Amino acid sequence: MSLRDLLNGLPIPILQAPMVGASLDALAVAVSEAGGMGSLAAGALSPEEIGRAVAGMKARTGAPFGVNLLMAPRAEPAAAELDAALARLAPWYQALGAPLPEAPNSFAVDFEAQLAAVTEAAPAVASFTFAILTGEQVEALHRAGVLVVGTATTVAEARAWAEVGADGICAQGFEAGGHRGHFLAEAEASLVGTMALVATIRAAVDLPVIAAGGIMDGRGVAAALALGAAAVQMGTAFLLSDEATTSAPWRRALAGAGDDPTRLTRAFTGRHARGVENRFMRQMHGVQDDVPAYPVQNRLTQPLRAAAAKAGDPEMLSLWAGQGVRLAAAGPAADMVRRWWAEAGEAAAEVAARTGRGTDG
Ligand SMILES: Cc1cc2nc3c(=O)[nH]c(=O)nc-3n(C[C@H](O)[C@H](O)[C@H](O)COP(=O)(O)O)c2cc1C
């Protein structure tokens, strides 16, 4: 089956964005069962955990779902770089009364091993961000019956994914919450809004485009489909759902976010990501270009963020969220998916009436 057929066959073309730190199998299964398509955020899972989670999900739903991996580069930072990065973080650890971690010798789960586990577990779809697979890796997934979606933040990245044989493109606009998926140009040169990105990728590449970034309700869903997206991928809109694993202080910060609360920062992980601005982001802003690149800084701040979550302190926690966060609401994920789809129908009817194409004139 082609990805286009799979997406066209979904009762509701709403995909739940995989979100490391905020979503696991429960959210993905709930969305797939509701008629959309969920995705397991497997970026931080070991190969064994991936195998177990996918087997468990297949036992719970016959509907298609995706598995997502973060393509972290292998990191071997010099000892002096690690020492400097830890010294910069020391006051933050101290403020929380948490011990400064020892310099670790591993920074992320081995990507090749994760990829082998995904290929073996064979979900309907596998999606990737931060880098690009080789043609051989895509072929191996295809041989296992897995459709491949590549994240692109520019037209050039979409073309690159098409060249290695991907089945579809997740077009990530700069409104999106969480990490930027850019991999060809630098972050600042990869900040295209969802509307322009979906339209230009669709014109450049003959593959189904999944629109991501700033889509928060049925109006956003209808708008993306009108632009020619085959489906939408929503992340921030699910962060307050019952099934999301979003921590309590993070949930409070999202629910209480004011107008225009998000910023891009490199300070937490060494890769640009969008979240609700807090004290850590503000105070680290001036040195964010000095911190080690992902995944090193990500690993060095993990214990800090875990301690902050435990202490209920939102000021030292990564509060990832997209520009539409003000529209996020709580509730069961299945209800959200069904409500957004009904709203999308209403929005489309309003537009049809406005353009003189409504059935009742
Ligand atoms: C908390 C959070 C975590 C995320 N983690 C991942 C991830 O693990 N893999 C991935 O491909 N995208 C990840 N994203 C990005 C989403 O796939 C998607 O691009 C984004 O959520 C869309 O924008 P929106 O948040 O405005 O809906 C994450 C987004 C958020 C908000």
Image (cartoon, rainbow, N blue to C red):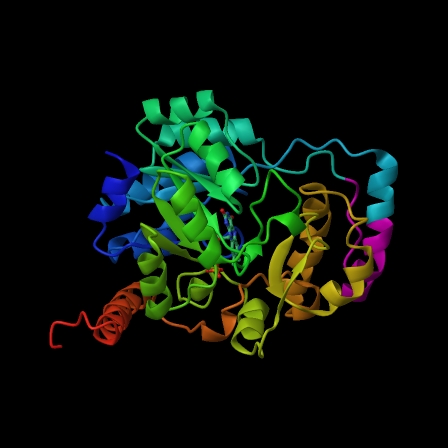
Instruction: Residue 135 in the image: state x and y as whole percent.
Output: 46, 23
Vertical side of 347 occupied by 320: above or below: above
Side of 131 relative to 66 (left or right): right
Instruction: Identify the residue at image location x=57%, y=41%.
Output: 130
Q: Is residue 58 visible?
A: yes
Q: Residue furthest front?
A: 356
Instruction: Identify the residue at image location x=74%, y=64%.
Output: 280
Instruction: Residue 116 in the image: state x and y as whole percent.
Output: 46, 26
Vertical side of 272 occupied by 109: above or below: above
Vertical side of 220 occupied by 112: above or below: above
Side of 237 relative to 317 (left or right): left
Where are the magenta residues, as a range? 86-103
Residue 351, picture quadrant: bottom left
Give the prevailing secondary structure in the magenta stretch: helix
Q: Does the magenta stretch include residue 240?
A: no
Residue 127, picture quadrant: top left
Instruction: Identify the residue at image location x=41%, y=73%.
Output: 330
